[in-house]
Image: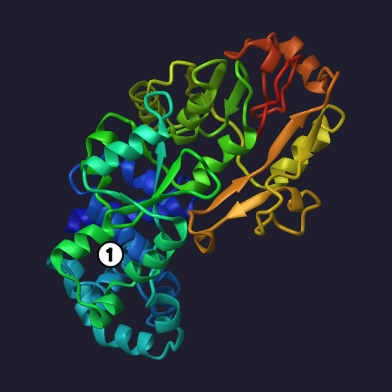
Amino acid sequence: MDRVYKETAVILKKLEGKHGSLQSLVFTSKNACSVKKKLFALASQTMKYKSPILEAMKECSLPGNAPKIGRHLCMILVYDLVFGKGIQCGGPLKRFMMENKEKLKSALSNQDRVNSECSRPVVLPKYARVNLLKVSVEKVIDLLKDINYNIVSREDFLEHFKSCSLPKQLAQTKKLSHADECCSHNIFCKDSLLDDVLMFCPSSSLTSTQLYATSHLILQDKASCLPAYLLAPPPGGVVIDACAAPGNKTTHLASLLSNSGTIYSFDKDRRRYSTLVKMVEKSGSTCVKPQCQDFLKENEHVIEDALSCFEDDFELIDCLQDWDRRGETSFAVGSCCIRMCSDDLTNGFFVAVFNRKLNTSVKTKSQTFEQKKQLESPIPKQICASVRKRKKNKKGKHPVTKK
């Protein structure tokens, strides 16, 4: 367990440094091949209790001068000691934590908000996207029925989801037979917004199905499906995915394009890029051209920066106007952007949509820069996009979007 604790600490440190999402950091960890489930569970639970744990550590002056115990490792050990199954290792780590056990419990017992903030975990539905390159939605529904999954209305699904997301309370109020319990977990419904997305209970074992193994169904959160849906690229369109790994958005775009056109998918991390290439191949996305390069971060500041360079040629669309959660109000562009979080029954996400104005050809100062440097881009000239120096967007027929 020492190895699990230390590897989880590395992941939390990278997560704090915004080097990726928790899921992607666990998935790409080269030291986590056989313990990925343990790593993800331990990291996510520690982050759930992060605020009270850090306050207790501060009150108890931890980790102090303890050798080889950094802040992130100490957070994990405090979680397991107080909220988890107890310290699952021996040696110096266990001795250190047991010496501070009573102080930590006392510090945490004085924090009234621990129960209110942390006692109810955030539970989200499990989303799966139908890979239209291989199969239709109707065919997938029939195949799911063949393996004892039952489709219900969205209203019935959400009513059941409210109960199954609190299993302890459900167990106390309603005892289900094993057959009934299995049946209740195997219900699903169509998403109300995205035609190619299905919603399942969190306990659904889709990864053990043939549909998942053959990439007919791709596990993808609803928030991650919105960029491709909002872009709605036309047949034959040219698209850039600026932060593509592990490949969910890229393969969704290919699915919507029916493999017509071209998708240039960027990721700067070589291990994540390798994952992207594998997913593109497995999903049958033949129109994708992966690029192992850096691109831009995503937030309202980037959107304003892009508009300041290309305001005569591109406009920011007020996308998905029925979506209540918009961008940060401190930015002028905030109302046109959308954000998603667990309150929307999705993971966190940020989306903005640009559209090229008619009868324009994009010319910027960076063209002179490129001419002087005589740079060659892996992307055709008509869609060459800015990476670090706000390079150019030359003539093109289709809109290019940055998320």
Going 53% across and 43% down the picture, which residue do you hit? Answer: 194
- The colour scheme used here is rainbow
Residue 211, picture quadrant: top left
Residue 316, picture quadrant: top right
- Give coordinates of residue 208: x percent, y percent: 20, 42
Name the image quarter holding the C terminus: top right
Going 45% across and 29% down the picture, which residue do you hit? Answer: 251
**For this rendering, which residue is in front, 330 or 142?**
142
Q: How many marks?
A: 1
- Does residue 31 appear anywhere in the picture? no
Neighbour tally class for label 1: few under 14, some 14-19, many 20 plus, Cα within 10 Å: few
- Give coordinates of residue 218: x percent, y percent: 37, 37
Name the image quarter holding the N terminus: bottom left
Would residue 296 be found to the left or right of residue 396 on screen?
left
**For this rendering, which residue is in front, 214 or 362?**
214
Would residue 9 be found to the left or right of residue 247 on screen?
left
Would residue 263 be found to the left or right of residue 303 on screen?
left
Depicted 2 relative to depicted 371: above or below: below
- Secondary structure state at the residue bearing disc 1: loop
Furthest residue toward left? 90
Going 37% across and 85% down the picture, which residue do you hit? Answer: 108
Q: The disc labelled 1 sits on which kind of residue?
A: Pro
Would residue 243 be found to the left or right of residue 364 on screen?
left
- Does residue 380 appear anywhere in the picture? yes
Depicted 64 relative to depicted 161: above or below: below
Circle 1 is placed at which residue position? 67
- Give coordinates of residue 17: x percent, y percent: 49, 51
**For this rendering, which residue is in front, 240 or 285?**
285
**For this rendering, which residue is in front, 177 or 295?**
177
- Give coordinates of residue 93: x percent, y percent: 20, 67
